Image (cartoon, grey):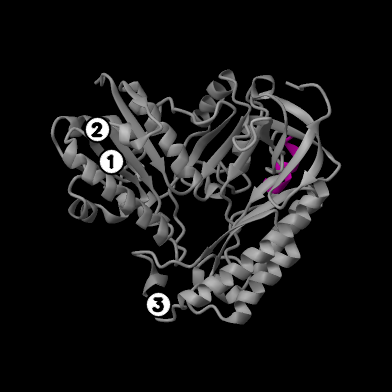
């Protein structure tokens, strides 16, 4: 069904998986005839792709919805959609709370947006949160970048971390076939995309739901095997992946990353806590010692590798000593970046019901102390770049300084240098680093464009 002269706006909250879903839903809308608008109040269709990992993200959604619900009373032709994890979690309750909504759809239904929207346009209010098998997606996404792209390799998560709502809202693990993943990457390579990030909520679990096993007793398809299979896709110069789980991160995978030149030396491996008792209460399935062994192996084979992670402070029952074990781990490993968060009770998770919740004051204090240490360690890690020559993949003009372009090192450090985007976009260039900050670098072009 083509839609004439209608505009849409998508607001995305949360993780890379949500960003990838939003790109696909934007592609569906444009295929239906909608046109993108930057300004929500100019849109005829508003879609909020939501996150429920933390309560503040959920409350932002309701704040946005309140404003648009008022607008719908003035313009009854406005279409309001909530997609993603809040939609899955709240379901019918969301429709009761915001009756102006036309469509509430969980993340497993992102590929069905056209079918669901056609029901809305026919006059129905639609709720789509039932579990489904995710069909292979042939949608052409509306990519937010012309240089880098996301490619989903596995949906859902089978882990049951006691704080996490993801399995409840994103469903069970469903791996795409290697052939489908490679086919999408080949199209991206033909279109000029230079860097691809392979995505999964628990990417190390890739393939364990696919049939077959090897003579060594492994699953026929593992994430390591997938990297070997897609590594030679023409046109693609860099490959990244996220998010890893220490429980399943193998030495075989580390060796593959060291061996395959297109795989960037950047690893995002959440550890969540540096204390074994807290990790056990979280249901993470590994110890602090195992996590350190993973990092040691990475740095033995790739000494300059960048390591980033996710950490939760103030988990129910966490003592000051246990929190200090987290600080100690951050101090010893020296992360390039940590995404930090204070524990937030989420509906339907075991930890939300425990009686040993910590006060907001304690959580805030610990978060502030961790962030302070992280800034110090990130600055220390940045020092190694000073004076070095780095290969930068140029992505965009620097919005804050139009005299500069921006890109990233192989280790994912944001880097700025003087230039015009028309000269450098999508190119790999050699840049000498002249200034370092905790989370970004500045440099000067040293060599001609490589690609």
Quarter of the view holding residue 132: top left
Residue found at x 24% / y 32%: 117
The residue to which callout 1 is attached is 81
Region of the chain picked out in magenta, as a range: 253-261
In this view of the protein, can residue 34 be seen by the observer?
A: yes
Residue 268 x, y percent position in the rendering: 62, 51
Does residue 420 belong to the magenta stretch?
no
Distance (Cα) linking label 1 and label 3? 34 Å
Asked if marks 2 and 1 touch (Cβ < 8 Å), the reply is yes
The residue at which mark 3 appears reads as 354
Q: Secondary structure at mark 2?
A: helix
Q: Earlier in the sequence, mark 2 or mark 1?
A: 1
Nearer the N terminus, badge 3 or badge 2?
A: 2
Q: Residues within 10 Å of mark 3 (few under 14, many from 20)?
A: few
**Magenta region, main secondary structure:** helix
Instruction: Name the image quarter holding residue 415.
Output: top right
Choose between 322 and 205: the one closer to the eye: 322
Q: Position of residue 100 (x, y in %)?
A: 19, 45
**Mark closer to the observer (1, 3):** 1
- The image shows residue 31 at horizontal and vertical percentages of 35, 22
Give yes or no for contact between labels 3 and 2 (Cβ–Cβ under 8 Å). no
Q: Quadrant of the C terminus?
A: top right
> Helix or strand or loop: what does disc 3 sit on?
loop
> Which dot marks residue 117?
2
Secondary structure state at the residue bearing disc 1: strand
């Amino acid at each position: 069904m083509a839609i004439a002269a209608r505009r849409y706006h998508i607001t995305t909250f949360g993780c890379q998986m949500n960003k990838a879903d939003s790109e696909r839903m934007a592609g569906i809308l444009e295929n239906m005839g909608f046109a993108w608008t930057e300004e929500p109040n100019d849109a005829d269709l508003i879609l909020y792709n939501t996150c429920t990992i933390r309560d503040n993200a959920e409350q932002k959604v309701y704040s946005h919805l309140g404003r648009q619900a008022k607008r719908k009373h003035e313009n009854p032709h406005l279409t309001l959609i909530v997609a993603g994890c809040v939609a899955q979690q709240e379901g019918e309750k969301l429709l009761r709370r915001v009756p102006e909504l036309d469509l509430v759809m969980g993340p497993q239904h992102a590929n069905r947006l056209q079918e669901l929207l056609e029901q809305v346009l026919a006059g129905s209010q639609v709720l789509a949160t039932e579990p489904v098998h995710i069909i292979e997606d042939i949608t052409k996404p509306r990519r937010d970048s012309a240089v880098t792209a996301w490619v989903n390799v596995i949906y859902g998560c089978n882990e049951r971390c006691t704080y996490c709502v993801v399995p409840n809202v994103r469903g069970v693990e469903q791996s795409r076939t290697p052939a489908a993943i490679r086919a999408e990457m080949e199209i991206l390579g033909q279109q000029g995309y230079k860097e691809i990030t392979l995505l999964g909520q628990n990417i190390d679990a890739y393939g364990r739901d696919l049939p077959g096993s090897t003579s060594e007793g492994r699953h026929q398809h593992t994430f390591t095997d997938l990297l070997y299979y897609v590594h030679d896709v023409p046109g693609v110069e860099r490959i990244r992946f996220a998010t890893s789980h220490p429980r399943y991160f193998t030495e075989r995978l580390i060796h593959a990353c060291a061996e395959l030149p297109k795989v960037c030396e950047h690893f995002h491996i959440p550890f969540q806590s540096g204390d074994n008792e807290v990790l056990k209460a979280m249901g993470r399935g590994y110890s602090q010692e195992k996590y350190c062994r993973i990092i040691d192996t990475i740095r033995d084979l790739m000494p300059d590798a960048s390591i980033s992670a996710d950490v939760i402070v103030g988990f129910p029952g966490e003592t000051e000593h246990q929190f200090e074990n987290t600080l100690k781990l951050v101090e010893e490993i020296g992360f390039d970046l940590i995404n930090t968060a204070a524990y937030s009770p989420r509906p339907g998770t075991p930890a939300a019901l425990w009686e040993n919740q910590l006060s907001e004051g304690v959580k805030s204090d610990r978060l502030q102390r961790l962030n302070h240490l992280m800034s110090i360690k990130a600055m220390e890690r940045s020092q190694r770049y000073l004076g070095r020559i780095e290969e930068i993949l140029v992505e965009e003009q620097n919005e804050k300084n139009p005299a500069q372009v921006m890109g990233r090192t192989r280790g994912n450090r944001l880097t700025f240098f003087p230039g015009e985007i028309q000269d450098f976009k999508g190119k790999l260039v050699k840049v000498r680093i002249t200034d370092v900050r905790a989370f970004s670098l500045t440099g000067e072009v040293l060599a001609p464009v490589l690609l």
